[in-house]
Amino acid sequence: MRPDADRTRRLARRALLILAVGGVILAAALVSVYLALPDRLQATAPASRLAEPGSVPIGGPFALVDHRGRTVTEKSFGGRYLLVFFGFTNCPDVCPTTLGDIARALDLLGSEANAVQPLFVSLDPERDRPKRLAEYVKAFHPRIVGLTGTPRQITAVAKAYRVFYEKVSAKSYYGRKSAASKEPKPVGDDYLISHQGNTYLMSPKGEYLAHFSYGTKAPEIARVIREAIAKYGNPARREE
C-alpha cells in the first residue's frame, strides 16, 4: 500500500505545482493586457456631451424684457455662455428643482461662473411680469436673469429652442382625470403650463453646445460647462 500512497502524494504535488504555475502565467497575462490598454480605457473619462458649434439648429436671436424691466437681446450678456431654461413661476416641481440645480452648478464653478449667464425664460407671460420674475429668480441665485415678453415673443423664442408648452388645467397637469372623462380645460387664471424641462448651453456666439434634461445634477452641469470653457475659451477673462 505504501508505494501507492507515495505515488498519490507525488501526483497531488505535481497537480498543485501545475495549478500554481498556471495561476502565475494567467495573472501575468492579465497584467500585460491591462498595461497594453490605452489610457482612456484604463481610466475612462466621461464622454463629451458637447456638440460641434453650429451643427444643431437650436437657438437664435431674441428680444425680451428682463426682470428689471429692460429690453434685452441675446447680445446683451457680454458674449458669455448662455444657460437657458424655460418655465413659469407657478411651476410646482420641474422649475424650482432645475433652477436649484443651476444655482448649485454656478456655486461649484466658482470664478468660472462669470463666463456663464443663466436665463429663466417665462412661458407664462400673462402672469410672469418683470416684478414677479424678480422676486422669483432672486430666491435661487443672484446671477439668474428672468425674461418675459409678449405672448408672440415667447412663442418665437420657444420655437427657436424647440420647446413645447401649453396651458393645461391643474387636474390635467397632475394626471388626475379619469380615462372616461374629457380633457379638463383651464379656466381663467386657474391653469398651469405643461412644458419640456431641458436646459440649453449656448456658446458665446449663440450656438447650441449641449442640453441637460430634467433631473441632471449640478456636478454634471458644472462639468460640461467647464469642458466648454476649456475648449472654447472664457469670455469673462478677456474683459479682465
Image: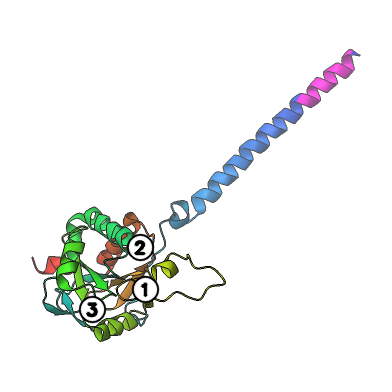
Q: Which residue is mark 2?
A: 94
Label 1 Cα crowd, 10 Å radius (few <14 / some 14-19 / many 20+) = some
Q: Name the residue tied to disc 1.
A: 51
Report if residue 234 is visible in the image: no
- Res 7 quadrant in image: top right
Provide the secondary structure element on which disc 1 rests. loop
Amino acid carrying label 1: it is Ala
Colour convention: rainbow
Residue 130, image x, y percentages: 16, 72
Choose between 44 and 20: the one closer to the eye.
44
Q: Nearer the viewer, residue 123 or 36?
A: 123
Can you tell which mark lies on residue 219?
A: none
Q: Residue at x 75, y 24 (%)?
A: 13
| Highlighted magenta segment, given as a residue range | 2-12
Query: Pointer 3 and pointer 2: residues touching (CB < 8 Å)?
Result: no
Q: CA distance from mark 3 to mark 2?
A: 28 Å
| Nearer to me, 71 or 9 | 71
Q: Which residue is mark 3?
A: 205
